[in-house]
Amino acid sequence: MKFTYFGHACFGIEVNGYYLLFDPFITDNELASEINVDEIEADFIFLSHGHFDHVADAVRIAKRTEATVVANFEIYSWLGKQGVENAHPMNHGGTWKFDFGSVKMVNAVHSSELPDGSYGGNPAGFVFTTSEGNFYYAGDTALHMDMKLIPLTSKDLHFCILPIGDNFTMGINDAILAAEFVKCDRVIGVHYDTFGFIKIDHKEAMKSFSKHDKELMLPSIGKTIEL
Ligand code: NI
Ligand code: MN
């Protein structure tokens, strides 16, 4: 699998020849000014919740690429009103088999309001099961006990993507516990540095993870890593 970081909580994962894009927030992210939003590839776009810093570029990219947008029912309905025709609604606890692998929508502890003020439903994370490996994207969330359910049904997570910026989501110490809860020692950190409230010390963060025998990866914006 190939992982490309586009800044904040936006990233792409190439798996089984399909390009999955997550929580697109690029044009309003000063740190991602090098990224051309109109060149990003997507066969599927996953939206964890309705906050602007996760959906801002979703409609634009969905219309250009005709990617299937996967989100909870409330966001799915909102996308329809924005003219996005190709979308797939899910809700918490449900699994669906897509062409690249299967996806389960799981709980996240956060809030969710769409940019126009409409109700965004409950925030979510996603667990992916694919022939190239399994992985978990937590979305914006606090540390919570339901994460312990994930390894009961999704064994051998190859890596997980966790928010680490604190203030709006988990910080470093809770993210280390989250990695323990889901039984995955390889973590890609997201949702940090973008705004004043979530700036982190990269070296300290990586040191804290390695003290607990875990690896924290913080690829720079625009960089692709092989996993
Ligand atoms: Ni949020
Ligand atoms: Mn956010």
Image: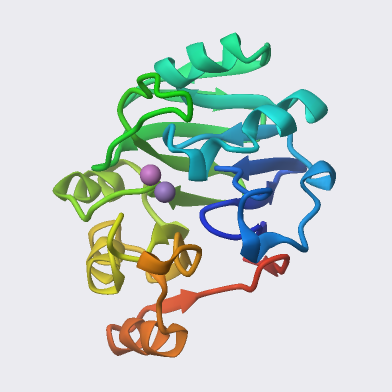
Q: Pick out the residue farthest to the right.
A: 39
Total number of numbered labels?
A: 0
In the rendered image of this protein, does residue 7 appear above or below residue 65? Answer: below
Q: Is 36 left or right of 127, judged from the image as shown?
A: right
Q: Position of residue 32 (x, y in %)?
A: 67, 61
Is 211 in front, or is 206?
A: 206
Q: Quadrant of the C terminus?
A: bottom right
Q: Residue at x 42, y 34 (%)?
A: 49
Q: Position of residue 102 (x, y in %)?
A: 52, 32
Judge whether residue 150 can be spotted in this image. yes
In the rendered image of this protein, does residue 151 appear above or below residue 218? Answer: above
Q: Is 128 left or right of 65, judged from the image as shown?
A: left
Q: Quadrant of residue 3?
A: bottom right
Q: Residue at x 38, y 49 (%)?
A: 138
Q: Position of residue 59 (x, y in %)?
A: 66, 27
Q: Residue at x 36, y 36 (%)?
A: 124
Is 58 in front, or is 145?
A: 58
Q: Is 29 left or right of 147, judged from the image as shown?
A: right
Is 187 in front, or is 54?
A: 54
How is the structure coloured here? Answer: rainbow
Q: Position of residue 52 (x, y in %)?
A: 49, 39
Q: Quadrant of residue 6?
A: bottom right
In the rendered image of this protein, does residue 128 appear above or below residue 66? Answer: below
Q: Residue at x 33, y 23 (%)?
A: 121
Judge whether residue 164 can be spotted in this image. no
Q: Quadrant of the N terminus?
A: bottom right
Is 226 in front, or is 205?
A: 205
